Amino acid sequence: MSRLLLSALLGLAASLATAAIDPHQFETVEQQERYQRFTAELRCPKCQNQNLAGSDAEIAADLRRELRRLIDEGYSDQQIIDFMVARYGEFVLYRPPLDRNTVLLWAAPVAFGVVGFAALGTLLIRRRRSAADPEPPLDAAEAERVRRLLEGGDELSSASRQPVNGGDSR
């Protein structure tokens, strides 16, 4: 009975803890929407592939508090992005800007797609050509030679044993 009561209390405490994550109320709906947009677009520096809204890390909580402060103080969207990048690097952005440091990041998917389509096109063209140009059937002499080779008979016919120079073998 005491274990059941303890489990219930722990479950209640956990639900209360998750309910109190973001109690901050903004003055306007626009500020609330900006906050939600930024928490979805900014990455947690510790969690690798999780945004600020979904991260429980302490650093994410710090960034959310900082974000609320910047929005309350009237910073523009670009000023907020500049502040976060200056403090945490471009890693904090899910969609980093296109510049010399990130050109490979943006170009790699396009390059892989082009290479993939080129390989697929080449494969399809080769298959089409091989289907259109089948090998000619063997004539009777070639078929006989193949049959003898498969049976383990004479490997070379008497005609192929004769010298090429018309009989002159020096």
Image (cartoon, helix red, strand yellow):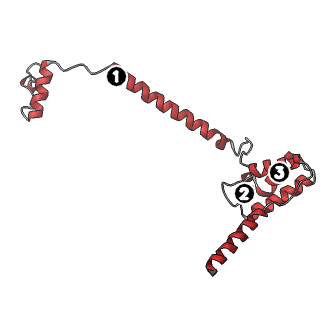
Residue count near mark 2 (Cα–Cα under 10 Å), binned few <14, some 14–19, many ≥20: many
- Image height of 150 relative to 37, above or below: above
- Residue nearest the viewer, comparing 163 with 37: 37
Disc number for residue 131: 1
Q: How many numbered marks have been drawn onto this rendered protein structure?
A: 3
Amino acid type at circle 2 is Cys
- Image height of 11 relative to 32, above or below: below
Which residue in the rendered view is the most extreme toward the front? 1
Examine the image and state in which quarter residue 48 appears. Answer: bottom right
Task: Give the number of the mark in front: 3 or 1.
Answer: 3
- Marked residue nearer the N-terminal end (3 or 1): 3
Callout 3: SS: helix
Q: Position of residue 110 (x, y in %)?
A: 61, 36
Q: CA distance from mark 3 to mark 1?
A: 60 Å
Q: Residue at x 80, y 59 (%)?
A: 63
Q: Position of residue 24 (x, y in %)?
A: 86, 59
Q: CA distance from mark 1 to mark 2?
A: 54 Å
Task: Give the number of the mark in front: 1 or 2.
Answer: 2
Asked if residue 56 lies left or right of residue 64, the reply is left
Q: Position of residue 102 (x, y in %)?
A: 69, 44
Amino acid type at circle 3 is Tyr
Q: What residue did someone put label 2 on?
A: 44
Callout 1: SS: helix
Amino acid type at circle 1 is Ala
- Marked residue nearer the N-terminal end (3 or 2): 3
Callout 2: SS: loop
- Marked residue nearer the N-terminal end (1 or 2): 2
